[in-house]
């Protein structure tokens, strides 16, 4: 399992509209992608306008090749992308341990 970690920054005044858009985009577009396993959207308490989008994928390639190389990626960016104050910082993680 791979965890995609996307650090997203938006204009804090757009918070309500962004939250509706990101949830709609994940539920209607990303959730249908090959290898999608689940997601969380976290809002930062200390930094208004900062969010973490955490998506679980079966494999790294499900995100980097299958999803990013599909028309669905453009659909996702059309929904959430207009809110981005800068390009999201995206990294991928593997679980080493958990409790």
Image (cartoon, helix red, strand yellow):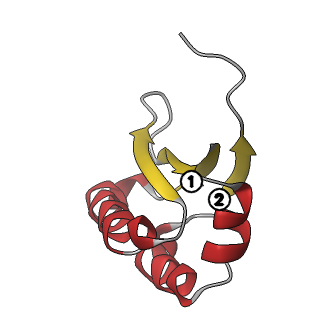
Which quadrant of the figure has residue 15? bottom left
Q: Label 1 vs label 2: CA separation?
A: 5 Å
**Left or right: 19, with 66 as reference point:** left
Q: 90 above or below 27?
A: above
Q: Which disc, if any, is residue 36?
A: none
Note whether residue 46 is visible: yes
Q: Which disc, if any, is residue 8?
A: 1
Instruction: Give percent across and percent down for residue 4.
Output: 62, 49
Q: Residue at x 40, y 71 (%)?
A: 32
* Residue farthest to the bottom, as pictured: 71
Q: Residue at x 26, y 57 (%)?
A: 16
Q: Which disc, if any, is residue 88?
A: 2
Which quadrant of the figure has residue 85? bottom right
Q: 30 above or below 69?
A: above
**Left or right: 9, with 11 as reference point:** right
Note whether residue 87 is visible: no
Please say if the residues under marks 1 and 2 sit with CB atoms less than 8 Å apart.
yes
Instruction: Give percent across and percent down for residue 48.
Output: 44, 41
Callout 1: few (<14), some (14-19), or many (20+) C-alpha neighbours within 10 Å? many
Q: How many marks?
A: 2
């Amino acid at each position: 399992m791979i965890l995609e970690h996307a650090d997203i920054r938006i204009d804090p005044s757009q918070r309500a509209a962004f939250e509706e858009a990101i949830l709609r985009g994940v539920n209607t577009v990303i959730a249908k992608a090959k290898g999608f396993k689940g997601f969380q959207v976290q809002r930062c308490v200390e930094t208004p306008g900062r969010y973490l989008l955490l998506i679980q994928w079966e494999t790294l390639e499900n995100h980097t090749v299958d999803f990013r190389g599909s028309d669905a990626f453009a659909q996702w960016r059309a929904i959430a992308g207009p809110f981005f104050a800068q390009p999201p910082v995206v990294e991928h993680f593997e679980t080493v341990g958990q409790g």
